[in-house]
Image (spheres, rainbow, N blue to C red):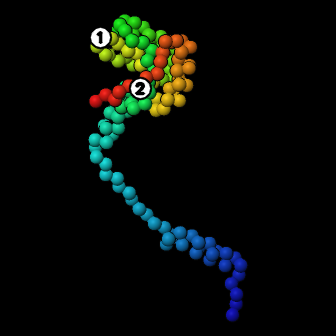
Amino acid sequence: MKLPSRFNLFVFSLLVIFFSEFALAQQATVTVHQDAKIPQLLELKKSLEKENKLSEGYTIQLYYGELNQANSIIRKYRGIYGTWPASIEYETPNYKVWVGSYGSRIEADRALIEIQKNFPSAFILKPERRK
């Protein structure tokens, strides 16, 4: 009985390895069915968070008073800082300029230290959750 040559053994080994990939390979298709309203709800949640309406944390108040002055303060703030979002909130009969939405008091304290350099009367508050 004649033994196979090394070359034949090598070629045979390569063929076994090559075809074993096809024999053991698996194919699958994943289909995800998602309610069409989920992307809309995510966008709504993002916009509410951006406007501080879902906040259960802290915010910084820069001003409380007339609308003209509130607009002036928010323009000044936006010209200096772009890190934290700012908004004007209305509470009869005055307007408030609020900055940021911080999940913890320490985050709000860090931001306040920076903001008070330009707005010394700024202070931290914990707004009531709006409905």
Q: Which mark is residue 93?
A: 1
- Residue 62 spot, x, y in % from top left: 45, 15
Q: How many marks?
A: 2
Look at 39% across and 12% down and name the residue there.
64
Q: Residue shown at 38%/57% (left/top)?
A: 30
Q: Which one is in front, 26 or 104?
A: 104
* Badge 2 amino acid: Lys
Q: Going by the image, does 70 lie left or right of 1?
A: left
* Residue labelled with disc 2: 126
Q: Earlier in the sequence, mark 1 or mark 2?
A: 1
Q: Is residue 16 visible?
A: yes
Q: Compared with residue 125, is residue 92 higher up or lower down, i.e. above or below? A: above
Q: In the rendered image of this protein, does residue 36 appear above or below residue 77?
A: below
Circles 1, 2 touching at the beta carbon (< 8 Å):
no
Q: How many neighbours does mark 1 have within 10 angstroms: few (below 14), some (14-19), or many (20 or more)?
A: few
Residues 63 and 87: in front is 63
Query: Considering only vertical position in the picture, is 59 above or below 41?
Result: above
**Quarter residue 31 falls in:** bottom left
State which quarter of the image contains the N terminus.
Answer: bottom right
Q: Is residue 4 left or right of residue 93?
A: right
Q: Residue furthest toward the bottom?
A: 1
Q: Is residue 58 left or right of residue 16?
A: left
Q: CA distance from mark 1 to mark 2?
A: 20 Å
Residue at left offset 58%, top offset 75% = 16
Q: Residue at x 44, y 27 (%)?
A: 58
Residue type at mark 1 is Pro
Q: Position of residue 111 (x, y in %)?
A: 53, 23
Residue 79: give x, y in percent of width and height.
49, 13
